[in-house]
Image (cartoon, rainbow, N blue to C red):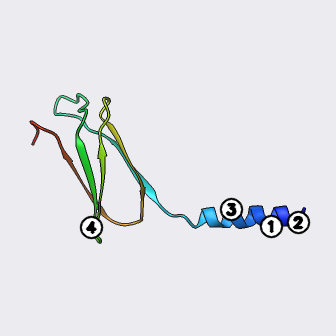
């Protein structure tokens, strides 16, 4: 029993050390309609590394597992400025 308990505690402490965040949003046009297929780029300002996503039919997007930092988000879609 004590071996099983030690393994569970060890696994829990490893999970607790993972630090990341997500950007979740909705792309909408000026009339508040959802924009599907928009290219979303999330750039880490320190490393210049970009994480990319495409908005869904509902305009929703998720960029998961981002390390801590400051980010700049840009969204592009044909016909929009």
Q: x, y percentage for residue 77? A: 16, 40
8 on left or right of 2 = left
Q: x, y percentage for residue 81? A: 9, 43
Q: Nearer the viewer, residue 73 or 48?
A: 48
Contact? badges 2 and 1 (CB < 8 Å): yes
Q: Mark 3 points at which residue?
A: 12
Q: What is the distance, in whole Å, between disc 4 and disc 1 at their CAs?
A: 40 Å
Q: What is the distance, in whole Å, between disc 3 and disc 2 at their CAs?
A: 16 Å
Q: x, y percentage for residue 18? A: 54, 64
Q: Looking at the image, which residue is at 83% across and 61% down?
A: 4
In the drawing, what numbered circle is on residue 38?
Answer: none
Q: What is the distance, in whole Å, between disc 2 and disc 1 at their CAs?
A: 6 Å
Label 2: how many Cα within 10 Å (few below 14, some 14–19, many 20+): few
Q: Name the residue under label 4.
A: 45
In the drawing, what numbered circle is on residue 6?
Answer: 1
Label 1: how many Cα within 10 Å (few below 14, some 14–19, many 20+): few
Q: Earlier in the sequence, mark 4 or mark 1?
A: 1
Q: What is the distance, in whole Å, between disc 2 and disc 4 at their CAs?
A: 46 Å
What is the quadrant of residue 16 in the picture? Answer: bottom right
In the drawing, what numbered circle is on residue 2?
Answer: 2
Contact? badges 2 and 4 (CB < 8 Å): no
Q: Looking at the image, which residue is at 29% across and 71% down?
A: 46
Contact? badges 3 and 4 (CB < 8 Å): no
Q: Nearer the viewer, residue 55 or 70?
A: 55
Q: Earlier in the sequence, mark 3 or mark 2?
A: 2
């Amino acid at each position: 029993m004590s071996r099983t308990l030690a393994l569970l505690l060890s696994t829990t402490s490893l999970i607790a050390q993972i630090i990341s965040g997500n950007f979740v949003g909705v792309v909408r046009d000026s009339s508040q309609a959802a924009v599907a297929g928009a290219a979303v780029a999330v750039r880490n300002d320190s490393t210049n590394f970009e994480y990319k996503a495409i908005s869904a039919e509902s305009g929703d997007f998720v960029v998961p597992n981002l390390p801590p930092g400051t980010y700049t988000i840009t969204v592009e879609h044909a016909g929009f400025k």
